[in-house]
Structures are given as C-alpha cells and as structure tokens.
Image: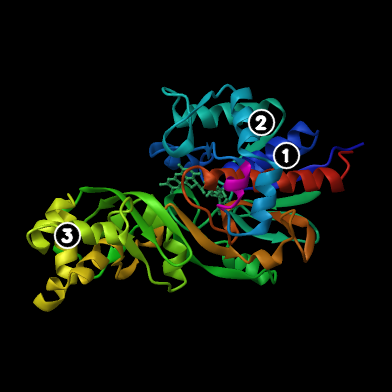
Amino acid sequence: MKTKKIGIVGTGPAALMAGTRLVENGFEVQFFDQKKAAARKFLVAGNGGFNLTNSEDCIDFIEKYDHDFMKNAVKKYTNEDFIAFLNKIGIPTYVGSSGKIFPERGIKPIEVLQNWLNELIEKGAEFYFDHQLIDFDPLQLTLQFQNNAIHHFDALIFALGGASWEKTGSDRKWQSLFQSKSIACLPFQASNSGIMLDAFDVVKEFEGEIIKNCAVFSKVVRKEGDLVITKYGLEGAPIYAVNKSIRDGLKTFIDFKPMLTFNEVLGKIQASKNTTEGLKNLKLPKSVLSMIKASIATREEYLDVKTVVNRVKNFPLSVDGFRPIDEVISTVGGIDMHEINENFQVKKYPSVYCIGEMLDWDAPTGGYLIQGAVSSGYTAAESIINLISVN
Ligand SMILES: Cc1cc2nc3c(=O)[nH]c(=O)nc-3n(C[C@H](O)[C@H](O)[C@H](O)COP(=O)(O)OP(=O)(O)OC[C@H]3O[C@@H](n4cnc5c(N)ncnc54)[C@H](O)[C@@H]3O)c2cc1C
C-alpha cells in the first residue's frame, strides 16, 4: 500500500520539527521553500544570541505565550524535549544568562541546521528549494509553485513565517492567497522591537550606552534588565516585554532604581544638599540624568522633590513607534488564531495545518520564539499521525 505523503511549505524550525515527527512515524515528507536553501531566518537568529529555547520551568515557560493553543503546544513538546532532540542529533547545549539555552560553545548555527537536515534526509525527507508557493487547493490537497508544478498530498502543512527580515524568505506575500481561501489574516505588526522615542535628541550623544538594572513596566507587565541607547531610542529585553502594552495603547514607564522604593529614593534626595546633588548620589548614569532633566518642564517642577522622584521611579516613555517591521526580531499578526483549532488544523479545511510565526501569537525573545515554532510543528504532526494512518 502507498505511504501517506505530507507536503510542508517552509523550512524554518516549525516546518522542520513537523517533518521530523512525521518521518519518525513513517510518513513520506516533502519540504518546499522559495529560498535556495533551508531556514535562513533560523541562521540569522544564530548570528545573534541563538537562544534555541529557555531552561525556565514549564509553569513559568507557558505563561510567556499569549494564546492557549501555544501554551498547550509547549506543554506537549517542552523545552526539555527540544533539548533532548538537539542532543540526539549531536548538538549539546548549555544554559546561559537568564536561563537561555545555547548550542555548546564552538558549535556554529549552520552545524545545528545541517545536523537537523541530515537527520531528516536520512529518514527519507525530500527538499525542494526555489519553490515559491503560488496557489493551493485546501480540499484537493494540492500545492502549486511558480514553475507551475502541481503536487498532490494527503495533508498540507504551511509554515511560512512572519513578516520581518524579508530577505530570509519570510515575506508575508502569502497572506492574500490565504485570504482568497477565506482564511482570515490580521495585519502584521512589530514585536520584540526597539522603540523610537519622542524628543530623543536629548540622549543621542549617549548612543551605545547601557543603562543597567532598570525595570520597564505598564499596568500589566514589568520586566527588569538592561537597556541599550541607540540612535533612535531604546532596545533591550525590558523594552521588548512592553511591546504589547505599547501596541495596546497602555502607558509605559521606566523605573531607574527598581531596588529602591519611592520613599527610599525620596529620602536619599532629601538627605542631599539639593536635588541635583541628590540625583548624583543615586549614581544614575549621565544619560538618565539628561532624560530626567529634559522631561521636567519648569524650575518649579524641578524644585518639587516628589516630581523628581517620580521621574526616577516612573519615567514616562513617550513612544514614537517601533522600528521598521523588516528589522524586528518577530511579528504578530498573520493567520487569525480563530481560523485554527488547538492542533493547528485549519477549521474550514481539516487536512490543512498552519504553524509557527505565520500565526497571530506573541512571545518574548530568549528562546521562546523558536520553542513556540517547534512545539506548534510537533503538535500539528501529532494530529496528522492520529488522524491519518501511514499506509
Ligand atoms: C535577528 C533575529 C534574531 C532572532 N533570534 C532568536 C533567538 O535567539 N531565539 C528565538 O527563539 N527566536 C529568535 N528569532 C525568531 C525566530 O528566528 C523565528 O521566530 C523563527 O524562525 C520562526 O520560525 P518559522 O518556522 O515559523 O518561520 P521562518 O523561520 O520564518 O520560516 C519561514 C519559511 O517559509 C518560507 N516561505 C515563506 N513564504 C513562502 C512561499 N510563498 N513559498 C515557499 N516558501 C515560503 C521562507 O522562505 C522561510 O524559509 C530571531 C529572529 C530574528 C529576525
């Protein structure tokens, strides 16, 4: 009897994990990608930190995702499962700062990818590059590519990525195709992005400086860490953590002295000769002093110690916008989560699955994005394994 054949479009981590699980279970798997080689964004991630996942325990880990389907997927295929898989394909890992999991020092990103591809090829997976998806039939289960080749499958998995770093192939051009099949898509927006600040001229001279140990918060989230001053504004994990609050129009603030209470800061300033002296005694960097001073409009306000303390503990971020979408680490938007079920199966077309960053979910950097991609891939593959017998 003929083996069941699954077509996967995309070769990022979501696609590769779905394919891995399927070939392990005897399915014939064909991957297609419009680029000349696999997983370009995965390699771009490798050029930076390359946090493959995070060592955080499961309860805290799943809270990083903003959608139940992603939480379920990460419970089903955890960080420990992914680490065990990486070890199995010859990629030892270690825990770095903030619990991030990296490949052992000396292992290049391309080696991680190559080991993964070898594992898939050894188990019979086939890869077709330079194949841009131009159409698909979600009922007949066919894929059509720019060379007009039409392939037929027993199930289709799409893992087409988000909307940043277009040169890696994640170019969001597939959206209109999905809309034409009545699969709703939401506009893409920047996530895990640096912010541009109004009136940022004040600290331009401090470009490259790191503001250490502060907290950025809104009424729904608070994240401590370091901020990096750039020529346009601020970058850093605490800024990325409030991206959603900014998108939702919530007010966001910096606490430059998270280890001290409001009254402790007040006490320190009051115990000093004057406010300027008091701010110096708080050992705030010059960039922060400039920001605080620039944010206080009048001498009267500056003389009111509580106003100054408020700027130290609750400095209001006057955000001008995010970085251009092509530059950001990840995006939200894409396929509306209402279109799929918890198995990442498109509700209207049960033999069609969408996984990874092409779906509208959000998580912070630090390994959670790649983990989300692979967990969704694993979950979709499990669903196919349960629904379709191999022969
Ligand atoms: C600078 C940077 C650093 C990052 N660092 C990290 C990190 O350290 N840790 C972390 O967890 N995450 C990180 N990420 C995010 C992570 O890389 C992505 O979330 C992840 O790659 C998403 O995986 P995916 O499989 O969903 O999609 P992608 O990896 O984006 O893959 C999508 C694939 O689909 C293909 N495709 C798209 N349209 C078509 C079409 N029409 N026809 C055929 N093929 C098509 C593309 O060519 C591409 O290969 C980083 C991202 C960036 C940009």
Return the residue nearer the eye: 303 or 127. 303
Magenta span contains residue 159: no
Q: For the point 43% across and 74% down, which residue is it?
A: 249
Q: Confirm or deny contact between disc 3 and disc 1 (CB under 8 A).
A: no
Which quadrant of the figure has residue 288?
bottom left
Label drawn at residue 120: 2
Q: CA distance from mark 3 to mark 2?
A: 63 Å
The kind of residue tagged 3 is Ile
Q: For the residue carrying disc 1, how many other residues have a C-alpha within 10 Å: few (<14), some (14-19), or many (20+)? A: many
Disc number placed over residue 74 in the picture, else none: none
Sequence-wise, the earlier of marks 3 and 1 is 1
- The region drawn magenta spans 58-64
Q: Mark 1 sits on what residue?
A: 29
Report if the CB atoms under discs 2 and 1 are less than 8 Å apart: yes
Query: In the rendered view of the protein, which quadrant contains the N terminus?
Result: top right
Q: Position of residue 294 (x, y in %)?
A: 15, 68
What residue is pinned by disc 3?
269
**Horizontal side of residue 384 vs 163, given as left or right:** right
The dominant secondary structure in magenta is: helix
